[in-house]
Image (cartoon, coloured by chain):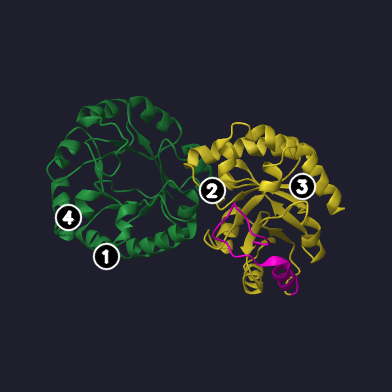
Chain colours: A yellow, B green
């Protein structure tokens, strides 16, 4: 059966954080703080390293009973038994990921506007990742759609969606207020001085 | 049912050749010349580009009824209906690729010595890619095992295997003479002035 995900505080990793040997303690702190969903995103490594890190990440998520998705790589998602995959516009088509992972897998799709949101819905996406909501240092090549962009997407689809890109404690409520089901967060969690309490604050704001 | 592959003249692509818009004509010439097997290897692109190129390559191979394997990426192999995947020591473990692609898929594994050959056999590999037999410009970080290295591998396994790395028309027979079932060839075919006749010469030498 397809799991029902809680998209409120959706932690996304990024390659740069894996240069820090402390990443696993940071992930543990984030999970302890209450992130509701994790995406393992790590773009630039050899497949064996991705597989080993994804396995380790999955074990950590399992410990906290938090579902994990994998960015881009349906093979890695399958290999570690992740709940599904998140595909961007330059990754495998959503239909292909669905065919590979099956009806019960969660397939998330990046959408930058209403047109891409509708196409993703037609392709069988379970949720959308929409942004960049705000300017972000993590993905420098992405255009900023603002909360107005999220509103336009909310107007055309009933699919769950999260805002992504530059979301912080200061603007998180604004993202929810335009109808997003949550936010995908990278730096505001993984670069925080106190990760656990930062996540707790996001969770508090989501209630 | 698992296909029986002909490993004699096994053409492997490499990322660098896709910078040349003429790659598709070159592949067509190689297939016309009689390559017996094709591996789509293309390491550095976004998944969508890999998928689109693999689809195109698969259609071309189908035209000549030549099986195609995909390097490293089991998801791309699955997505385009390739015969299987070739995994190196830094790619997904062979068992994981097998689990993903099923019993009828061809799983090839790179082996640099007898120990890795035996491990690959135990992991369920269908064939081995062994080398580098000779120095090669395509993979600069690989150590050279020579035909003596191939002999040592032949001595411990009955699995089909191909020599890879620096194989040319001048040394191809030496590779077969130590018991290899064929050779995986990159530059000696794709950089040839007359690709079709070069492949025909490899095929002649293999008889």
Q: Which residue is mark 3?
A: A36
Quick check: is A132 in the magenta stretch?
A: yes
Q: Residues within 10 Å of mark 4 (few under 14, many from 20)?
A: few
- Pair 3/4: label in front: 3
Is any part of residue B118 visible from this angle? yes
Q: Secondary structure at mark 1?
A: loop
N-term-proximal mark, 1 vs 4: 1
Output the chain of dot 4.
B
Q: Circle 1 sits on which residue?
A: B22
Work out how far the residue at label 3 is from the one at label 2, CA to CA, in angstroms: 23 Å
Is B121 located above or below residue A159 in the figure? above
Residue found 36% across the figure and 30% down from its top? B117
At a point 19% along the width and 32% down the height, the residue shown is B178
Query: Is the same chain shared between marks 4 and 2?
Result: no
Q: Which mark is residue B192?
A: 4
Q: Could you classify mark 2 by the number of other residues whose Cα lies within 10 Å: few (under 14), some (14-19), or many (20 or more)?
A: many
Tell me the chief SS of the magenta region: loop
Magenta-drawn segment: A131-155
* Quadrant position of residue B122: top left
| Up/down of A152 relative to A20, above or below | below
Which is more foreground, mark 4 or mark 2? Answer: 4
- Of badges 3 and 2, nearer the viewer stands 3
């Amino acid at each position: 059966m397809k799991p029902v995900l809680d998209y409120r505080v959706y932690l996304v990793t990024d390659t740069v954080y894996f240069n820090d040997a402390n990443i696993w303690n940071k992930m543990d702190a984030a999970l302890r703080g209450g992130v509701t969903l994790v995406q393992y995103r790590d773009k630039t490594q050899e497949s064996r390293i991705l597989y080993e890190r994804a396995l380790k990440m999955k074990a950590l998520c399992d410990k906290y009973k938090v579902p994990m998705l994998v960015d881009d790589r349906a093979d890695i998602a399958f290999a570690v038994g992740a709940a599904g995959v998140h595909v961007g516009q330059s990754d495998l088509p959503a239909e292909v990921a669905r065919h590979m992972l099956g009806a019960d897998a969660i397939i998330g799709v990046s959408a930058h506007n209403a047109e891409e949101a509708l196409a993703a819905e037609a392709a069988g996406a379970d949720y959308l990742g929409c942004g960049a909501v705000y300017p972000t240092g993590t993905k420098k090549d992405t255009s900023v759609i603002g909360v107005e962009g999220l509103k336009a997407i909310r107007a055309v689809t009933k699919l769950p969606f999260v805002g992504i890109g530059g979301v912080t404690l200061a603007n998180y409520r604004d993202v929810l207020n335009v109808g997003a089901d949550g936010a995908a967060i990278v730096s505001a969690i993984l670069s925080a001085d106190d990760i656990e309490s930062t996540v707790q604050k996001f969770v508090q704001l989501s209630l």
